Image (cartoon, rainbow, N blue to C red):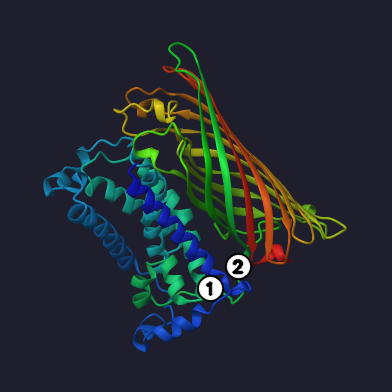
Amino acid sequence: MTFSKKIRFFLFGLSFLTCITSLFAEESSIAFNLQKYNSETTSSGLSSLYSKPNDGEKHYLLAFGGVAIISGTIYSWNRYVTKSDWSKVTLDYMAHFYEHEASFDIDWYWTNFVLHPYQGGLYYMIGRGSNLNKIESFALSAIGSTAWEYFAETNSPSINDMIYTPIGGFVVGEMLYRLSLEADSVSSLLGKALNPTRLYTEPFAGRQTKPDSKSNIHDVSFKFAVGTQKHYTSFSGTNAPENESELFPVFAYPEINIVYNDPYGWDTNDPCSQFELIFHAGAGANSDRAQGDNKNIMYDVSLFANYILLSRAPETLNSDKKDTTIGFIFDYDFIWQNSIELSAIAPGFGYYQRLHRYNSDKIEWQFHQDWVILGSSDYYYYLHNYVPQYTHGDYSYNTGSKTKFLWRYITKNGSIFHTDISLFALWDFPYQVQDGGSAGWDIIGIANVNYELSVSELINVGIGNSLYMKKGLYEDAPDLLQTAYTGTVYARLKTKSLRH
């Protein structure tokens, strides 16, 4: 990955965080009035075009036309601006689409596991803005993804893209669709920044609004952290490399945490009507062992989102002293660092419970048991010294299980003790192994222990500890044990429920 690419995705992450944080600025004492700015800078003609009531009818042609516009825009950029070789598609190539054999691709990590779900989310939001329901919008995203793979690239149709784009597009798209409607209460410009497809759908189908005026945002906080990270990797087996260690001396990142509707005591048949998003993007000093394109900067981009798809709040498990949710959930994990890569899209079962203590303190805990439909983890030799030059990518595709347990104690004044552990057992698909690589098992554990002290109504300060451990068991390569410890100090700006 080139230095310029790193700067682009880092700026993208910062822009995203700034955009989302602005959504909730009115809730804090540092608010500014975006609504006034919006009203002063929007012409009356444009305002009327985007303010007519929604007609409530399904616009299928509008939806398919929007998919074609999105795909055509992305294709044209790659064909005529970046002049990518894979975009030089001919009519003859498209006419013989049925001869194209699907396979896994090993594209840039950010492209496969962030940009493709976002592209699928744009397809999905086009459907929602055209008044299609969730199932129809998901189908639209799947059709758009499949058409792209078979008609818009000279590369083999990508199996992983046709999974990640519609499934990731559903959860990303529904999340942005809902946040966009919430943002309208602050600024219609911000709402359209979160869901730009509204610029296309609203003049024809009319403006969509929330069913009521009540805010669905349960909790919002913004964190800024500074930390350090230490890696150690040991190898075993025949022809094993020497053990290695790396130190990333200092890095920093901003982070946004959004909880949409309270997950505890949540009873719903509406998929993704409750979700939590944690996203951060940071950078810092690289280790002295870094080589090639990786030598300039240490990067750290992580996204964790979990959604409730269908849930019940049984009366027998709910009372004045406890709020309980049982249901089907969906977890989306993405970690992209210099020496760690991990992603997973995983539906499963979830159990959530909040206990109210006599002194107004609260205990919250969650249990998730998921099936990882498709995941990825970094290659066994991903430390900088061991990445062969002939290897196109640095990760393998896999499937398996994820188990997560979370426990949190919140005092009445807002101080928090938080711990969670996630365990992955991932089996690498043999038919996607790259030259020089190996199939096998990746057993991964991630544990976090954080403590935050409330110093005011708006601010918490805290210390964070994170331990990543991976045991790689491979068929044709040395086994490994990799550990990474991350320590951080941080400040958190509280804008909603943590203050109460």
**At 52% across and 69% down in the image, what residue appears?**
22
**At 64% across and 57% down in the image, what residue appears?**
491
| Labels 2, 1: front one | 2
| 358 relative to 293, above or below | below
Q: For residue 306, say whether it is visible.
A: yes
Residue 91 is situated, as x and y percent measured from the top left of the image, at: 12, 49
- Whether residue 442 sits left or right of residue 434 in the image: it is right
Mark 2 and mark 1 lie on one chain; the one further toward the N terminus is 1
The residue pinned by badge 1 equals: 210
Q: How many marks?
A: 2
Q: CA distance from mark 2 to mark 1?
A: 10 Å
What's under tag 2, amino acid-wise? Asn
Residue 118 is situated, as x and y percent measured from the top left of the image, at: 40, 54
Q: Nearer the viewer, residue 18 or 489?
A: 489
Quadrant (top left, top right, bottom left, bottom right) of the N terminus: top left
What's under tag 1, amino acid-wise? Lys
The residue pinned by badge 2 equals: 216
